[in-house]
Image: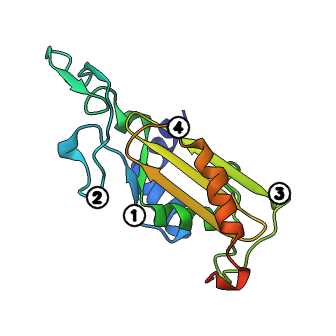
Amino acid sequence: MARYLIHLVSGDLEAFLKDAVLKPALTTDVGIARTLPEDRDSREPWYSSRNLLRDVMHPEKEEIVPEPDGAFNLDAALALTASAEGFVRFMRRYHVGHGTPLENPATGAWAAVPDNGLGVYFGSMAGTFTIAIQRRWDEVNIAVLFNQNGKYEALAEELNRLVDTIPPDAWEH
């Protein structure tokens, strides 16, 4: 519903996302994932999946394709692609899960929010897995993106442990 309303108001969902959400986060390397490999940005990865399904993008064909290449519609799902650096920039600007700004765009100062704690987020689609860690108390954000599904949840705990060993004055702001 939100996608439809934004499309009605702005006329172009992807342009709206880039101008209203991503541009203020100072990240331009986020885009909409494309279902068919020939439609993808050259920076978009190959998605590794063992699943084989009928091609929903070409239902008239009997061909079995690897998921997600035609197995479901990434474009319609509004799946986003990003580099780890772009994702970290996004997390620097917004309180993930709430969407509220964390950084004053004019001054660059960190904005206090009621929950200055820890957020650990996982996301997955066929052939992808993402770990995002937003440490609001020390302003450290971590993003790890995989082009293959797996059981990476334990990695989040290990990453937090490793970050805790780095002295605070070693971080560049």
Visible in this render: residue 19? no
Residue indicated by mark 3: 115
Disc ID at residue 43 = 2
Q: Quadrant of residue 69?
A: top left
Of the image marks 1 and 4, the number of the one nearer the N terminus:
1
Q: In percent of the image, x 21 and y 25: which residue is there?
A: 65
Closer mark to the observer between disc 1 and disc 4: 4
Q: In percent of the image, x 45 and y 60: which residue is there?
A: 18
| Residue type at numbered disc 4 | Lys
Of the image marks 3 and 1, the number of the one nearer the N terminus:
1
Q: Secondary structure at mark 2?
A: loop
Q: Could you say which is closer to the camera, residue 22 or residue 96?
A: 96
Place of residue 163 in the rendered image (x, y in percent of width and height, measured from the top left): 66, 67
Q: Is residue 168 left or right of residue 125?
A: right
Disc ID at residue 151 = 4
Q: Is residue 59 above or below residue 40?
A: above
Q: Secondary structure at mark 3?
A: loop
Q: In percent of the image, x 62 and y 45: which residue is there?
A: 154
Place of residue 12 in the rendered image (x, y in percent of width and height, measured from the top left): 39, 49
| Residue type at numbered disc 1 | Asp
How many marks are shown on the rendered structure? 4
Q: Is residue 89 above or below residue 172?
A: above
Visible in this render: residue 99? yes
Instruction: For marks 3 and 4, give the CA distance.
Output: 28 Å
Answer whether labels 1 and 2 touch (C-beta < 8 Å). yes
Q: Residues within 10 Å of mark 3 (few under 14, many from 20)?
A: few
Place of residue 167 in the rendered image (x, y in percent of width and height, measured from the top left): 71, 80
Of the image marks 2 and 4, the number of the one nearer the N terminus:
2
Instruction: For marks 3 and 1, give the CA distance.
Output: 28 Å
Q: Residues within 10 Å of mark 1 (few under 14, many from 20)?
A: some
Place of residue 59 in the rendered image (x, y in percent of width and height, measured from the top left): 21, 17
Q: Could you say which is closer to the camera, residue 120 or residue 112?
A: 120
